[in-house]
């Protein structure tokens, strides 16, 4: 409706320019892996109709969007009409050093294609700097409609060797950072009676993975954070959902390749492009997702899935109360058939998504 109105009120030259800009975006989005140029036979008129301006004029902060999955979110949101705050401190995968370059580069890319974006290089991992990230949206565009908590680092180590520093650094960026960002945006969302959050979680926590106690704990903590935000803020029309992505990025490039099985796995992950996660994120930031709250999604290449969430699955009751012995003799045997297997993410998702 809005789109038709704005198109019909534009002069022909403006319409042509809009088409050209869009075509550049769609060409990018439609490139196949390893292909330098998009498929020339693509019918952009069809693509225009299919994509639309799904988040037009929404102001959305994407943390850690100088690289990888977040970068694709920023590009796709801008292509769908959002004004994007591209936040990134430009650090290494392990969180060492800073560089203003990645955030600015994404902003330049968005602007070159006719989109709107502003860079911010504050860290999500501290309360004051997280507030500055939200303030960047307010100063640049006068409002804030969405926050995607995507920034992340890794400090992998087997649990028995993990240092306090490795634990704290990862919790600070992923979990505390998501709290700071979400909390800083909450008063705006509450007063305007709208808003949307996405928190990037991981199957490392949801399903399990070796050597990632800090990361898995943070990513599972995000599920709790998201759930309670969803409950507490539903009355203000604010939604909170999680996405567990699978994508080849510098983060996943650290997956070990010591064994033939690991090598084969990495070859498959290399085909999982970060841009494939973006359509779900754009949808969740849009008004079309107004009824989607408190969910946990996953995306791997062409596959989107929904995760189960905790529900009671078995109950045992003893009218005279339990003793340690009766727990051992009755309760545990009654529940054992429902115990989870000690499997991990690659064992549980062992099919191809292409
Ligand atoms: N790639 C995957 O397969 C995968 C799987 C599961 C979860 N995830 C999650 O998705 C998100 C994006 O991952 P990615 O693969 O694109 O990683 P990435 O390393 O390519 O990008 C992460 C970005 O976050 C930025 N960053 C780090 N600390 C920051 C801070 N304190 N403040 C602001 N920015 C900061 C980094 O500079 C980097 O640009 C992460 O939360 C990650 O845990 C990714």
Image (cartoon, grey):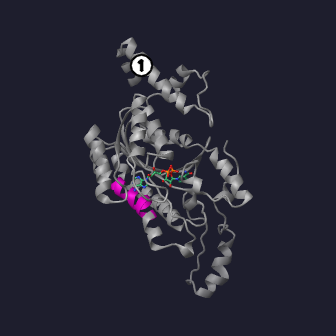
User: In front: 297, or 115?
Assistant: 115
In percent of the image, x 42 and y 39: which residue is there?
A: 106
Residue 179 belongs to magenta span: yes
Bin the neighbour count of mark 1 within 10 Å (Cα to Cα): few under 14, some 14-19, many 20 and up. few
Whether residue 317 is visible here, answered yes or no, is yes
Q: Is residue 350 left or right of residue 5?
A: right
Q: Residue 198 location, x and y as percent?
A: 44, 49
Q: Is the magenta stretch mostly helix, strand or loop?
A: helix
Q: Is mark 1 within 8 Å of ligand 1?
A: no
Question: Which residue is the site of mark 1?
Answer: 17
Q: Is residue 128 left or right of residue 226?
A: left
Q: Residue 236 location, x and y as percent?
A: 33, 47
In percent of the image, x 54 and y 40: which residue is there?
A: 275
Residue 183, quarter of picture:
bottom left
Residue 317 belongs to magenta span: no
Q: Residue 104 location, x and y as percent?
A: 38, 41
Helix or strand or loop: what does disc 1 sit on?
helix
Q: In this view, does 122 lie above or below 312?
A: above
Whether residue 55 is visible here, answered yes or no, is no
Looking at the rendering, in which quadrant would you find the C terminus?
top right
Q: How many numbered marks have been drawn onto this rendered protein structure?
A: 1
Q: Residue 127 location, x and y as percent?
A: 31, 59
User: In front: 63, or 9?
Assistant: 63
Q: Give the range drawn in magenta.
A: 170-183
Residue 8, quarter of picture:
top left
Looking at this view, name the residue that lies furthest to the top.
12
């Amino acid at each position: 409706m809005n789109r038709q109105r704005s198109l019909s009120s534009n002069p022909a030259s403006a319409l042509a320019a809009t088409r050209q800009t869009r075509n550049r975006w769609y060409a990018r989005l439609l490139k196949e892996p390893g292909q330098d140029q998009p498929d020339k036979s693509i019918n952009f008129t069809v693509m225009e109709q299919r994509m639309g301006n799904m988040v037009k004029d929404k102001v959305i902060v994407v943390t850690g969007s100088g690289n990888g999955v977040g970068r694709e979110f920023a590009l796709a949101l801008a292509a769908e009409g959002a004004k994007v705050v591209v936040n990134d401190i430009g650090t290494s995968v392990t969180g060492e050093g800073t560089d203003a370059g990645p955030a600015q580069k994404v902003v330049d890319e968005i602007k070159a294609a006719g989109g709107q974006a502003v860079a911010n290089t504050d860290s999500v991992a501290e309360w004051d700097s997280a507030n500055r990230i939200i303030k960047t949206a307010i100063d640049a565009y006068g409002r804030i409609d969405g926050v995607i908590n995507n920034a992340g680092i890794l400090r992998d180590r087997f649990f028995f060797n993990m240092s306090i520093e490795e634990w704290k650094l990862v919790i600070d960026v992923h979990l505390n950072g998501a709290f700071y960002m979400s909390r800083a945006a909450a008063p705006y969302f509450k007063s305007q009676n709208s808003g949307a959050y996405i928190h990037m979680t991981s199957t490392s926590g949801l399903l399990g993975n070796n050597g990632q106690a800090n990361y898995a704990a943070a990513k599972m903590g995000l599920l709790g954070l998201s759930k309670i935000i969803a409950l507490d803020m539903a009355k203000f029309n604010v939604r909170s959902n999680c996405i567990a992505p699978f994508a080849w990025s510098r983060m996943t490039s650290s997956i070990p390749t010591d064994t033939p099985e690991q090598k084969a796995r990495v070859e498959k992950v290399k085909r999982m492009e970060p841009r494939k996660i973006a359509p779900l994120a754009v949808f969740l930031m849009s008004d079309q997702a107004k009824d989607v709250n408190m969910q946990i999604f996953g995306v791997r290449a062409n596959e989107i899935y929904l995760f189960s969430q905790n529900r009671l699955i078995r109950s045992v009751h003893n009218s005279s109360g339990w003793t340690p012995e009766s727990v051992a003799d009755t309760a545990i045997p009654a529940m054992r058939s429902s115990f989870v297997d000690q499997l991990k993410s690659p064992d549980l998702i062992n099919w191809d998504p292409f």
